[in-house]
Amino acid sequence: MINTKRDTSAPVEAEEINSRGYLGFKELKEIAVTNDNIKSFTDNIQQYIHQNNTDYNPAYYEKIMGLIDKSKLQGITLVFILPPVRLTEGMMAVFNAIPDENKIEVCDPEKYPELYNSDNWIDPIHLNTIGSTYLTQYVCKQFSRINNN
C-alpha cells in the first residue's frame, strides 16, 4: 500500500517567476488541471509509449551509451527514468535502444493510472504531494527490479 499522507514539513513553494522566466507555483496553480488536460497528456503518451521505432538520433544514443560505459568503469549502474512527461518519437527511440538495466519507465497511463488522476497534480506540469509520492514509490519498485537482476 502506498502511503500518501502529506508531509507538513515540506517547504513552501516559490511564489514568483524565476530568473529563467518560468512561472512560480502560485501562477501555475491558477491554471486549473482538468480531466481534458490529463486526457491530452495521456493521448500524447499513448501515441509514443508502445512504439518500436529504432530510428534514433545516433549522437544522443552514443552520448547515453558513453555515460553508461563510464559509469560501469566506476562500479555505478546509471539509470535513466522516463517519468510522466510529454513524449516524442525521438525520445522513445533512444529510450527503447538503451539496455533494460539502464532504464526505468514510469509514464504508461495503463500501468500507473494514479499518476494521471487530475487530483494528483498541483498544476498542468507538476505532480502534487500525493502524485509525487506515487511516482517515488513506482520508481523505487522499478529500481528494486533492476537491482535484483
Image (cartoon, rainbow, N blue to C red):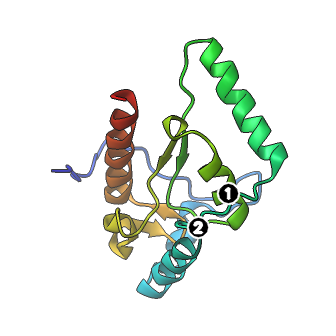
On screen, 87 above or below 9? below
Q: Quadrant of the C terminus?
A: top left
Amino acid marked by disc 1: Ala
Q: In the image, is 5 to the left or to the right of 60?
A: left
Mark 1 near mark 2, Cβ–Cβ under 8 Å? yes
Closer-to-camera residue (26/103): 103
Secondary structure category for the residue under label 1: helix
On screen, 69 above or below 113? above
Mark 1 crowd level (few <14, some 14–19, many ≥20, 10 Å Cα):
many
Amino acid marked by disc 2: Gln
Q: Residue at the location (78% across, 36% down)? A: 63
Q: Where residue 115 appears, x then y in whole percent? A: 38, 64
Secondary structure category for the residue under label 2: loop
What residue is disc 1 on? Answer: 93
Q: Residue at the location (55% across, 19% down)? A: 76
What residue is disc 2 on? Answer: 51
Q: Where residue 7 appears, x then y in whole percent? A: 28, 46
Closer-to-camera residue (135/27): 135
Q: Residue at the location (34% across, 63% down)? A: 111
Q: In the image, is 124 to the left or to the right of 54?
A: left
